[in-house]
Structures are given as structure tokens and as C-alpha cells.
Image (spheres, helix red, strand yellow):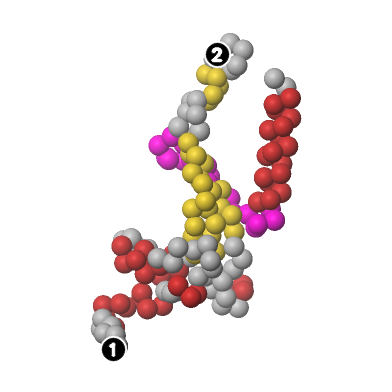
Amino acid sequence: MIHEYPPADELGDARRLPDDKDCPHWCPSQHAEHFLEVVGDTVYEASQHFAGVAEMTLGELRNYIDGRLSRPGGSHVDVALIQYPHPSTNGGFNGPPLVELELSTIRREQSASVELTTGEARSLAAALLRAAELGEDLR
């Protein structure tokens, strides 16, 4: 079977994006589609391996004794696995997979994110579980 490819000028920078065989097993392998559809994305941004792991919307929190509002609901927590391509500090190969934790306000106007190694993510998860256990003992 003969494959007909679009002329080079139609693909341009998209030819430099990873294909399925270059992606880790957890990456959905849609780099070219992302690059061609998202206006303003660079080849570097479209080359990042990314997998959304969890999205949470935090509920309203009230004081369990008197019912006063302690935290309005609607803030967001997103967890993803990312891997940056070709970092200069790693000899041109992909960097390590990182767990990205992003916290944002109700309308996503303000946010904070942190990128953790898999070991750091496990340590944070253990600390959060321990804090939750201690907090539940206070009720």
C-alpha cells in the first residue's frame, strides 16, 4: 500500500512531534492533534507527555458545631502526570515523569501548582493521609 503524505509545508513543525511509539504508556498520544488545534501552542508545549489523573471540585465547608461557613465551595484540584521533552539538563532526552498538583479558585482566576517527582508525590500522599487520620480523631 502506498501512503500519500501531505506536502511538508502542510505539516511544518508538526513533523517534530512525538508519535505513538515515542510516548510512555500513560500518554494518550495526541500530540499532533493538540498542536494543530490549540492556537498559540509551541512545538515544545505540544510535545509534553500529559495524562489527567483526577479532577475534584471542593464542596462548601461549614463548622460542624455551629454551621458557620468556613470555606465556600467550588475551588478546583487537578492532578496530572506530565513529562517534559528534551530538557537541556538531560542531554536531549525526556525528563522524569512528574506529578502536577494544581489548586485553583472557583472561577480559576487564581491558581497555584507544584510539580513533584513520583517519590515526592508518594510522600505527600502519605502525609495527607496521616493528617486526615489525625483530623478525624478530633471529632
- Given residues 32 and 103, the one toward you in this image is 32
Q: Is residue 134 magenta?
A: no
Q: Amino acid under label 1?
A: Ile
Q: Is residue 43 left or right of residue 25?
A: left
Q: Which residue is mark 2?
A: 67
Point out residue 22 in the picture as x, y percentages from the top left corner: 50, 74
Q: Distance between the Cα atoms at labels 1 and 2?
A: 70 Å
Q: Residue at x 26, y 81 (%)?
A: 6
Q: Is residue 37 left or right of residue 26?
A: left
Q: Which residue is mark 1?
A: 2
Q: Which residues are magenta?
A: 102-120
Point out residue 44 in the picture as x, y percentages from the top left corner: 45, 69
- Mark 1 and mark 2 lie on one chain; the one further toward the N terminus is 1
Q: Residue at x 62, y 74 (%)?
A: 90
Q: Tell me the element at label 1.
A: loop
Q: Tell me the element at label 2.
A: loop
| Observer able to see residue 98 | yes
Q: Residue at x 32, y 78 (%)?
A: 12
Q: Residue at x 63, y 54 (%)?
A: 116
Q: Is residue 134 left or right of residue 13?
A: right
Q: Amino acid under label 2?
A: Gly
Point out residue 106 in the picture as x, y percentages from the top left corner: 43, 34
